Amino acid sequence: MSYEKMGTEALDYMPCRYGDSRLLFRGPMRNLDQKYAIFLGGTETYGKFIAKPFPDLVEKDINRVCVNFGCVNAGVDVFLSDPTVLLAAQRAETVVIQVMGAQNMSNRFYRVHPRRNDRFVGASDVMKTVFREIDFTEFHFTRHMLGTLCARAPDRYAMLRDELKQAWIARMRLLLSNVPGRKVLLWFAGAPPAEAALQTGLGPDPMFVDRAMIDALRPLVDDVVEAVASAEAQKQNCNGMHFNELERAAAKRLLGPKAHQEAADALVKVLSM
């Protein structure tokens, strides 16, 4: 299948809200008074710049309503803190949870915005003590903050990275414990999980998550699906994506339509069983 560049064609994400949630999800709004599968995840699940993200493609193949509860730049916190999302997940037949990075969560070193988890809110006293030379008022986003700490204090940064990894496992266990139905964990990325997280640098997305962390969750889920984008899909770059010129750099960092189709195919094999 070939894809053409979409250039400046804008997508209508048909944003909608469910219940009392303050979160905006990708539409169209689905009826939750019937049997459905729900998809929790970050930018990839939401399908930023993608006309048909993988939840839509899965719905077509399994002939079951699939509700897209993906949030751009989400961490685990955004779902744990939203009662409407948790209730919808508890009532779903199947819950697919995309593996999200560990950087966008509140922890004992720093806090993130409860709904926009990539937004850095503030450093804790512990953080300020460990990184005394850093002015945390300079930062608005977690990735920028972590990149600066990694470059300027790599020895102490390792302590922070390890804290985030442990917090991620604990937070994911809490989320999974709140979902009684069938649970599928989805790894959707350009490479398989590393055997161990990098000891230097920020590493690829999902940040800081390695295979040992995935394995720690296996007893709590029914299936783990690794959807690693093929070389062909990655060569497509941002072909077939909808963005304007100001969004081109952001689009290039994301997986395109072919990768979404591959992820959907991998999920369908599991969800059809």
Image: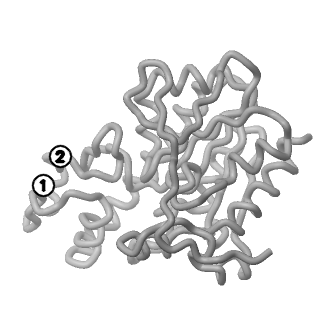
Task: Kindly give the residue lying farthest to the front in the view shown.
Answer: 9
In this orientation, which residue lies closer to the viewer: 29 or 112?
Answer: 29
In this orientation, which residue lies closer to the viewer: 113 or 180?
Answer: 113
Q: Which residue is mark 2?
A: 124
**Residue at 28%, 42% in the rendered image:** 113
* Image quarter hosting the C terminus: top right
Q: Is residue 111 above or below residue 203?
A: above
Element on which disc 1 rests: helix
Task: Kindly give the residue lying farthest to the right in the view shown.
Answer: 273
Could you tell me residue 202's position as x and y percent?
40, 71
Q: Which residue is mark 1?
A: 128
Q: Is residue 17 above or below residue 166?
A: above
Tag of residue 108: none
Element on which disc 2 rests: loop
Amino acid type indicated by mark 2: Ser
Could you tell me residue 78's position as x and y percent?
42, 37
Could you tell me residue 266's position as x and y percent?
80, 56
* Image quarter hosting the N terminus: bottom right
